[in-house]
Image (cartoon, helix red, strand yellow):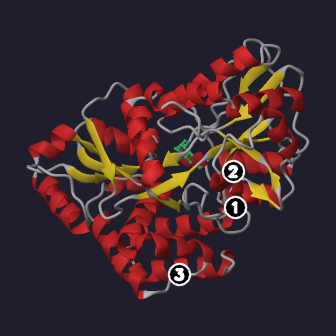
Amino acid sequence: MRFTKGAAVAAAGLAVSLLVAGCDTSGGATATGGNTKEVEVFTWWADGGEKAGLDGLVGQFKTDCAKFEFKNGAVAGGAGANAKQVLASRLQTNDPPSTFQAHAGAELTDYIKAGQVEDLSADYKTWGLDAAFPKGLLDSLTVDGKVYSVPANIHRANVLWSNKKVVAAAGITAAPKNLTELFAALDKLKAKGVTPLALGKDWTQLMLLESVLISDLGPDKFKGLWDGSTDFASADVTKALGDYKKLIGYANKDRDTFDWTDAEKLVMDGKAGYQLMGDWEAADLDTKGFKDYDHIAFPGNDTAFQWLADSFVLPKGGKNPEGTKCWLKTVGSAAGQKAFNTKKGSIPARTDATAADYPAYQQSAMAEWKTGVVVPSCAHGSACSQGMQGAVASAIGKFSSDQDAAALQKALSEAQKQFVTKK
Ligand code: GAL
């Protein structure tokens, strides 16, 4: 397992409109904090495969922690685009949920350095978690020898999904293996009158750009972008931005108003051929009953496995720490990981899972996780801090309308100078 510990810290600050799901499935408990049994779990898993995964975990929590009650604090919006803003203001006003979802790596480090989460090292020992997770993953949850969160899974970000029928109807007979072949396939889809590449807003565009950067720079130089050893102002990046611009030319024009599920719907409805998205899409397509899909690593990424991990923390000053610890213990347990990951499209973070217990997609991901070259994700916090993520996402959002590649490169380079501490 070849993990990279992500870069350092900063704070986010994007203004967004909020879609608060916040539905209470606890069966009676309402006011947060008014009920000592209540464990408010704050995520952005409100629908489809994401909700199915959360429901699996909640089922296990009900068995393991019967004296406590689950309160759903989900705030809808892919990749936590809305949830993170709500969370930031709750943390600022000293109103933390019992636990919240945080990505392993630099994003979690932000919360640790801000003193917002508790050290779980002693609980790791009590629950036997030290030995349950791979060392590289534990490193991404640890600062100064103390471990701060319990990982639920490993997701892969750099996956290209397709509608099999649409792709076949366009005469694409073999999966594209590099960017040149991808452009040829996109041309065929364009000639058929469908949207070649379904795309959503800022963070989904960042995922696409990251995949192109992996193809053009290779995994090592790509990793260097996030620890400062590769310069965002370099000629390799200029070439990648040219390819990225070309790719955007094949995407739907209304992308900036789309969440990832809106882009996914274009694929499901046969209106688009491909979509780059993390492997939560596998669970979501399954949950929605769509079967005609295929998946490959993004062309040119070869064996690069772009990882991210969802984890749960014990916030400082959170309500019901005892109930929260029961939740965290369930998250880290073999049964909890199975209940969650079989439904979520991700693979278990624990190393003792049985592949045969999982759907076909996760079985293939487990095999690729073992043999692939591991690279982190900026869009999903394993590679960069929330400050860097915000700066990069807004530069990309601007590019989506002005298509100025030189300005994009300059903005990326400035973000790197501001937020990345050179190793
Ligand atoms: C990621 C998260 C995944 C999935 C995805 C889309 O940031 O780690 O579990 O939820 O966002 O919302």
The C terminus: image quadrant:
bottom right
Q: Mark 3 vs mark 1: which is more N-terminal?
A: 1
Instruction: Specify the amino acid type for callout 3.
Output: Thr
Q: Earlier in the sequence, mark 2 or mark 3?
A: 2
Pick whichever, 396 or 226, lies toward us. Answer: 226
Badge 1 is on which residue? 12
The residue that label 3 is drawn on is: 230
Amino acid at the residue labelled 2: Gln
**Image position, residue 46 (x, y; %):** 57, 32
Judging by the rendered image, the residue that carries numbered circle 2 is: 85
Distance CA(mark 2)–CA(mark 3): 30 Å
Secondary structure beneath label 2: helix
118 in relation to 63, above or below: below
Which type of secondary structure does the marked residue at label 3 adopt? loop
How far is mark 1 from mark 2, CA to CA?
8 Å
Disc 3 residue: CB within 8 Å of ligand 1: no
Residue 366 appears in the picture as rendered: yes
